[in-house]
Image (tube, grey):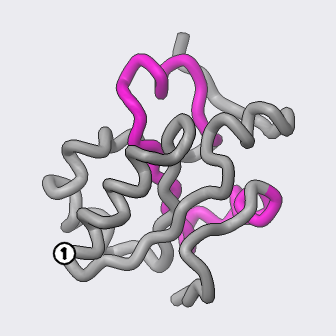
């Protein structure tokens, strides 16, 4: 299990973890339309308001990284997970920073 010393991870760190799917679960908590327009490769879509319904899936992972467009929804999802005893970290700068840096993305549209 990865123990994080902070409540967030850098986009560069996450980019380096994209091939380590077995140890990191990336969760996009934006709306469906935002997710379909583009997301971090390998991210699971779980809207922030539905997070409590997915806690059983998140318990099985070794580390959980959350992101939204700019931060508020991911922070709320992090607090909801904490209420269920699940530790998660936020992606620094969230989707805005990931896209601004030109990192790879997937899109369904």
Q: Nearer the viewer, residue 14 or 100?
A: 100
Q: Nearer the viewer, residue 45 or 79?
A: 79
Up the image or down, 51 lies above or below 79; here it is above
Label 1 environment density (alpha carbons within 10 Å; few <14, some 14–19, many ≥20): few
Taking the spot 59% from the left edge, 84% from the top edge, the residue there is: 4
- In magenta, the rendered stretch is 12-40
In this image, 72 relative to 94: left or right? left
Q: Is residue 26 magenta?
A: yes
- Does residue 51 appear to the left or right of 103 in the view shown? left
Could you say which quadrant of the image residue 76 lies in?
A: bottom left
Spot the residue most to the left.
53
Residue 14: quadrant of the picture: bottom right
Q: Residue 29 sits in which quadrant? A: top left
Total marks placed: 1
Q: Which residue is mark 1?
A: 84
Compared with 5, 8 (above or below) is above
Pinpoint residue 1: horizontal percent, then vertical percent.
52, 89
> Of helix, strand and loop, which one carries label 1?
loop
The quadrant of the image that shows the C terminus is top right
Query: Where's residue 107, x and y in %?
Result: 60, 21
In the current view of this chain or complex, which residue is farthest to the top?
109
Query: Is residue 32 shown in magenta?
Result: yes
Q: Is residue 87 above or below residue 102?
A: below
Q: Evaluate whether residue 44 shows in this view.
A: no
Q: Which residue is farthest front?
A: 72
At 16% from the left edge and 57% from the top edge, which residue is drawn? 52
- The residue at the point 66 percent across, 57 percent down is 92
Where residue 38 sits: x, y (%)?
A: 59, 25
The residue at 52%/55% (across/down) is 26
- Residue 3 location (% of width, % of height): 55, 89
35 relative to 84 in the view: left or right: right
């Amino acid at each position: 299990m990865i123990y994080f010393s902070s409540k967030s991870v850098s986009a560069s760190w996450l980019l380096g973890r994209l091939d380590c799917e077995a140890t990191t679960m990336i969760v996009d908590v934006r709306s469906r339309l935002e997710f379909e327009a583009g997301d971090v490769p390998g991210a699971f879509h779980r809207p922030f308001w539905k997070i409590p319904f997915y806690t059983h899936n998140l318990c099985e992972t070794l580390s959980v990284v959350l992101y939204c467009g700019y931060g508020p929804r991911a922070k709320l999802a992090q607090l909801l997970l904490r209420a269920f005893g699940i530790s998660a970290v936020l992606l620094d700068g969230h989707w805005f920073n990931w896209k601004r840096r030109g990192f790879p993305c997937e899109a369904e549209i």
